[in-house]
Amino acid sequence: MKHVSLGGLDVSRIGLGAMTMAGVYTTGGGLDDSESIRTVHRALDLGVTHIDTAEIYGPFHSEEVVGKAIKGRRDQVVVATKFGLVSHAGDSRAPGVTDSTAANVKAAVEGSLKRLGTDHIDHIDLYYQHRVDPNTPIEETVGALAELVTEGKICHIGLSEAGPATIRRAHAVHPVAALQTEYSLWTRDVEDEILPLLRELGIGFVPYSPLGHGLLTGQIRSVDDFPDDDWRKTNPRFTGENFQRNLAIADEVQAIGAEIGATPAQTALAWILTRGDDIAPIPGTRRVARVEENTAADGIELTSAQLERLNNLTPAAGERHNEANMAAIDR
């Protein structure tokens, strides 16, 4: 597996997102922690060094699973997790409440360290603000993170779904190693302003949902296959005419993959790996077979003609999140 640098942090250029290990697309039915742990182990065996989770996933369950999976193998793993969507004010925990105050940052990190069970290395490698808190100045949040770096509890600071102005303000307080934001063949808005800014500042980029919430795998042909509580049923890109139009994107990705003997998922990941040597996508799965498929994208080469076809795919129809989730994104 090739490696890249995220603001000085060395990671495998394909990572593993652990969100679905807590059943985030649905309310958690059908989870198999043993399979999730086997998936992490298989990823490590295949050369993946970058595992991404968050306290809100579950909440807390994904971190617990990752902690169990990396026990005894901590020195092989760059552990990334996120805070800010669970408020720890007082003695209570309030999942879904945005809180990036200094006090909450310091409370959150202690819980994550405990759940991740970081063996003999008592730190988190990459600690992200999950969403920008409109009620807390980013300078306060990053100042608290900088103190955690000094204390040795975290090594690198990250932001997720932050806009250009926030990125600049945060980076002025303490170097930001990575930005995590959605990026794929059907979500390319970061190319206009965000990616040039990251490269100006020397910040790495971690695309989440590089497979378009599953649509780019070619396995989804009808939203009727989703459970009733699957949040993709409320996502504009999976509803009505938008869904039918977006299937055409998946079909073209599949056609190009067929030319080189690659699956649609591998083709979509191979494309994103061509976008720069400072990009490290984190396709999410809780299945061994899927992690084997995804990591194989590291060895796939696309021709210039195929890249041109992928670069010029029709843009996705519909917003990438519903109205409530889009409102939580800093722009």
Image (cartoon, rainbow, N blue to C red):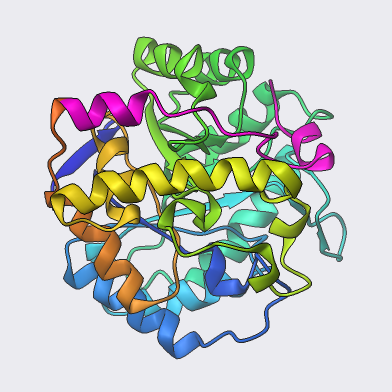
Q: Is residue 322 magenta?
A: yes
Report x, y in % for residue 213: 55, 53
Q: Residue at x 30, y 47 (%)?
A: 255
Point out the image quarter for the C terminus: top right
Left or right of residue 125, residue 158 in this image: right
Report x, y in % for residue 69: 38, 78
Tell me how many marks there are: 0
Residue 81: tell me if it is visible: yes
Report x, y in % for residue 161: 60, 33
Closer to the camera in the image, 240 or 280 = 240
Q: Residue at x 78, y 73 (%)?
A: 228
* Residue interval drawn in magenta: 305-331
Q: Quadrant of residue 20?
A: bottom right
On screen, 282 above or below 34?
Answer: above
Q: Residue at x 33, y 78 (%)?
A: 288
Residue 129: tell me if it is visible: no
Q: Is residue 218 magenta?
A: no
On screen, 293 above or below 100?
Answer: below
Closer to the camera in the image, 232 or 170 = 232
Left or right of residue 211, residue 5 in this image: left
Q: Residue at x 34, y 55 (%)?
A: 265
Left or right of residue 73, residue 65 in this image: right
Left or right of residue 154, residue 228 in this image: right
Report x, y in % for residue 73: 25, 74
